Amino acid sequence: MGRIQDAFSKARSQNRAAFVAYLCAGDPDFETSLAACRAVIAGGADVLELGVPFSDPLADGLTNQLAAQRALESGMTAARVFELVRKIRETSQVPIVFYTYYNLVFSNGVDRYVQTAKEAGVDGLLILDLPPEEAGEAGAACARHGVDTVCIVAPTTPDSRLPKIARSATGFIYYVSREGVTGVRAKLAVGIPEAVARIKAHTALPVAVGFGISTRAQVSEVAAHADGVVVGSALVNVIRDGLSSPSGIGPALATKVADLRAGAARP
């Protein structure tokens, strides 16, 4: 098994959901971002979902848009993102999934991009705006180079498309629990247990749930039904709140992740 499968298997054996932590690569700068990534791993993240900064992140709310803007303004490029992954790999074998957009893959050459990602230490690609019907080239490149694919199911996805989406994924299925963009929400979206069950009827892969999850109680509620819980904006906000004192970002993130991850345990 690869690192992604190992992470979900380990969480399952411990009777908990895997905790997936999202950070934007290079936010607010390379060195602080590296420290932040190491901190969320130290805090207990089972999977690191690394957002590749992009100028037009259509699936992202304001928190993650501003994170991408900070990263781009600090000089992050595709090459620097791969460098960040290599630095993380010096001290950790936690699975890394790129959260990205197809233009960033396509413009660098699909096969070359996937190969470079694999060589840097990336385990999976979640390409937000690439539906399975158009993912042939990227899927083939991922299969060729041993990179897992992560596919999205939304609340609006009809049952008729679930088998196609399930066949396209090799890492896990990411259920986007609400319509709209990423961001902290006071309440969870409705219908998560039913949606997870609907997806599981078509795949044996793990199902992780994200978008709008920001508290330990919300993590616990989702973990009762899903194989993984994704938290992003709540962690990115820790970086935002620490911009005036960057040395404190790492410890604050480690504490935040440890608290949220504790909610992933099942009774």
Image (cartoon, helix red, strand yellow):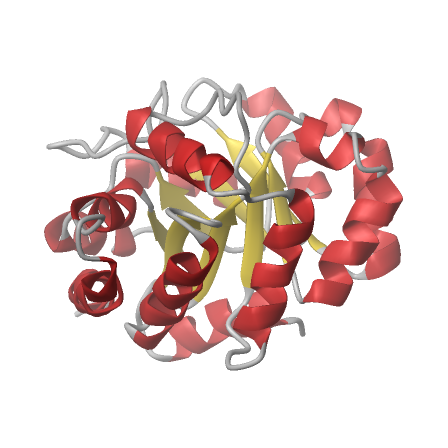
Position of the C terminus by quadrant: bottom left
Q: Which percent across, then down, holds residue 108?
A: 80, 37
Res 109 → quadrant:
top right
Query: Is 119 rendered above or below residue 59?
Result: below
Q: Which percent across, then down, holds residue 130?
A: 67, 27
Query: Is 185 rendered above or below residue 122?
Result: above
Q: Which percent across, then down, holds residue 67?
A: 37, 37
Relative placement, left or right, of 68 versus 210 is right
Q: Which percent across, then down, holds residue 59?
A: 45, 24
Q: 166 or 101: nearer the eye?
A: 101
Q: 32 or 233: nearer the eye?
A: 32
Residue drawn at (55%, 42%) of the image: 52
Question: Can residue 116 be seen here?
Answer: yes
Question: Can residue 5 be seen here?
Answer: no
Res 10 → quadrant:
bottom left
Relative placement, left or right, of 103 versus 183 is right
Q: 115 or 249: nearer the eye?
A: 249
Position of the N terminus by quadrant: bottom right
Relative placement, left or right, of 8 versus 129 is left
Residue drawn at (78%, 24%) of the image: 134
Total marks in image? 0
Residue drawn at (51%, 21%) of the image: 157
Residue drawn at (38%, 67%) of the image: 35
Q: 216 or 235: nearer the eye?
A: 235
